[in-house]
Image (cartoon, rainbow, N blue to C red):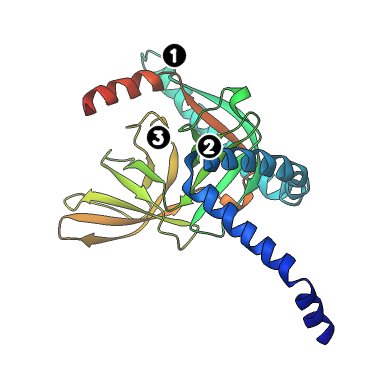
Amino acid sequence: MKKLIHLFVKNFHFLLFIFLEVIAFNMLVRYNFYHRTTYNFIANEVAGNIHSMTSDWNEYLYLEVENDMLSKELANLNNQIDILTNKIEDRDIETSKDSSFVYLNSRVVYNNVSSRHNYLILNVGSNDGVEPDMGVVAGKKIVGIINSVTKNHCRVLSLLNTDVHISAKISKNNYYGTLTWEGNDEDEAVLKDIPIHLKLNKGDTIVTSGYSSIFPDGVQIGTIKDYVVKDGMFFQVKVDLFTEFRSLFHVQVVKNLHSQEISSLMEETEK
């Protein structure tokens, strides 16, 4: 203990200098927009490269879980194909291959689920056509929204982030509200602003509303777990989330081909 105290006293001025440098750097980044932007850009790129080197091992550990998830997703898709095929054969239905959305496959190199502001880092960036405000899904299940992009990586605000708000609806009746995560249970979110005259049932499916340029209509979010009346006018609905955020490795970036056109019209309306 005496040696430790002696070492501290001997190097006091050097340690004080380092401490003051850290404080100065923190203030420089926090209160200067240019320096903060540059720092975030470099930090995201470095973090992306570091996590890329460690993600292969983590991916191997969760390979069994991911295979199980992919197997279930494939079975679900095959069931939907069978249903649609029967409908097309039974009825005169017009089909179109035109779509406003395209999907870019990517790999998760970092994933945090332990804070109130969780995020992921993917191994795709501006070189791959990725831009901020694009959605991210895993199969047909929601993951989050991109908020920062470097050349080779991007940062995704997870649905498990209290700053993320998703326009979501009840699948059976198309009534929509705002879905948020309250920072508690990683398997549960809250859907607000649902009128109390609606008949809700536990187990009803919640999906994206399609009322934004980020996600297409019908991306799966979860099922109704419970609900209570708030302010005497609306239901506050607890949603049991479909996405297993701890086992995400392969996800898809969602690109809306008409996002700029939609944003332009919305900006004109707001003027």
Q: Which amino acid type is shown beneath numbered disc 3?
A: Gly
Q: Nearer the viewer, mark 2 or mark 1?
A: 2
Is the residue under label 1 in contact with that under label 2 (CB below 8 Å)?
no
Q: Residue 66 appears at what percent x and percent y? A: 67, 45
Of the numbered discs 2 and 1, the one sitting upstream in the chain is 1
Q: Earlier in the sequence, mark 3 or mark 1?
A: 1
At label 1, the amino acid type is Asp
Residue 198's place in the image compared with 74, above or below, is below
Crowd tier of the residue under label 3, counting other residues whose Cα lies within 10 Å: few below 14, some 14–19, many 20 or above: some
Q: Nearer the viewer, residue 5 or 192?
A: 5
Q: Is residue 72 visible?
A: no
Q: What residue is at 54 percent from the left and 49 percent from the top?
A: 28
Q: Identify which amino acid the numbered label 2 is placed on.
A: Ser
On screen, residue 84 versus residue 174, left or right, reads right
- Residue 98 is tagged as 1
Please tell me whether mark 2 sits on a helix, a strand or a loop: strand
- SS of the residue under disc 3: loop
Element under disc 1: loop
Residue 184: name its quadrant.
bottom left
| Residue that appears at 47% across and 48% down | 31
- Residue 217 shown left or right of residue 111 in the figure: left
Q: Position of residue 4 (x, y in %)?
A: 80, 80
Q: Nearer the viewer, residue 164 or 243?
A: 164
Q: Provide the residue designation for mark 2.
A: 148
Label at residue 218? 3
